[in-house]
Amino acid sequence: MPDHDLGHHGDREVAPGLVDLAVNVRLPRPPEWLRQELVSAVDDLAAYPDPSAAQHAVAARHGRPIGEVLVTAGAAEAFTLLAAALRPRRAVVVHPQFTEPEAALRAAGHAVTRVVLSSSDGFVLDPALVPESADLVFVGNPTNPTSALHPAATLRELVRPGRVLVVDEAFLDAVPGEAESLAGHRIPGVVVLRSLTKTWGLAGLRAGYVLGPESVLAPLRKVQPPWSVSTLAAVATEVCCRPAALEEAEKLAAAAEADREYLVNRLAGAGVEVLGTPRGPFVLIQVRGAAQLRLRLREAGYAVRRGDTFPGLGPDHLRLAVRDRSTTDAFLRVLSGLVANG
């Protein structure tokens, strides 16, 4: 049995009345243009969903053949499909990272080998740490919760004949220019996962997709439940691939980057250690007594994500979502006081 609560996610930290720094969804609600598209699609709900338009939109967005796209009910469904469809001899999950890949593998009866990166070097990915015998490897980029962005060249070093490399790019559209992305590259054995929920405020809708070789996606299609992608999720996927939406996403990524740097600087000024070089819309901090600090922050009105449920992290780690500067300022006033008073 796993020694961490792999089913714990940031939404468990949130409660009415708390300022949410625990969930990595950037927008509090979808933008108005997206809301209008979804409302317009409500009249189509009597018909069974058809994600083919969304599939074509994703293929065009990433310059891939239609057969290399699978639209899913969020990136989380993709982990379940991969675990159900593939028969790895040795599955490896690079930690610390999102716990759903390991949870899905274990639920499907697969043994999991953990490769745990170190905070001492900023969670740098060394391809040599992954066993040569691994035929299924999961890695996040940028990684939740460390916010580390691995170079595309480093990820390519993990490619092997007979190996499926799954790169979770759920937060890649929050990185300006989508730096280090493999989504537009057709590499044998490489599967890329994308999510729309983080940038567009769609966590409740479940919208995502998988990119990869047809030979890998074919068994996933066979185990995907019929109509798992709702009409509204398919519409959201299609319209969020339009050029205007991609331009807006780039602006949101630039804003998130500036807000993250502001948060990092404010944390440093408060004497709080930020681990690694964060590149995603969240940061990982290490502070003594983090478990008690998290509870005291809740009492003060703030929800933050505990870190000890992630393999490779411990009770002194907390993850903070990047928010606007006024929210950061208010939070840092509370945090600084709590840290100063022990």
Image: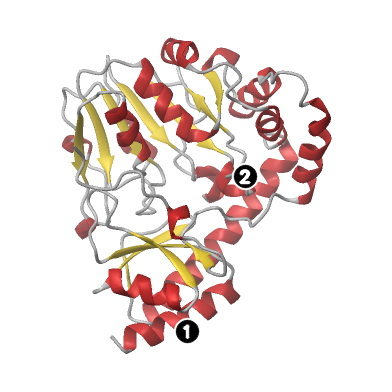
Q: Could you tell me which quadrant the N terminus lies in?
A: top left
**Label at residue 202:** 2
Q: Earlier in the sequence, mark 1 or mark 2?
A: 2
Spatial CA distance of label 1 from label 2 is: 30 Å
**Front-most of 119 and 300?**
300
Q: Is residue 117 left or right of residue 241?
A: left
Q: Residues within 10 Å of mark 2 (few under 14, many from 20)?
A: many
**Front-most of 49 and 157?**
49
Q: Is residue 230 left or right of residue 158?
A: right
Vertical side of 287 occupied by 199: above or below: above
Q: Is residue 229 in sight in this rendering?
A: yes
Q: Could you tell me which quadrant the C terminus lies in?
A: bottom left
Q: Residue at x 47, y 29 (%)?
A: 77
Q: Amino acid at mark 1?
A: Arg
Q: How many marks?
A: 2
The image position of residue 201, as x and y in percent, is 63, 49
The residue singled out by tag 1 in the image is 333
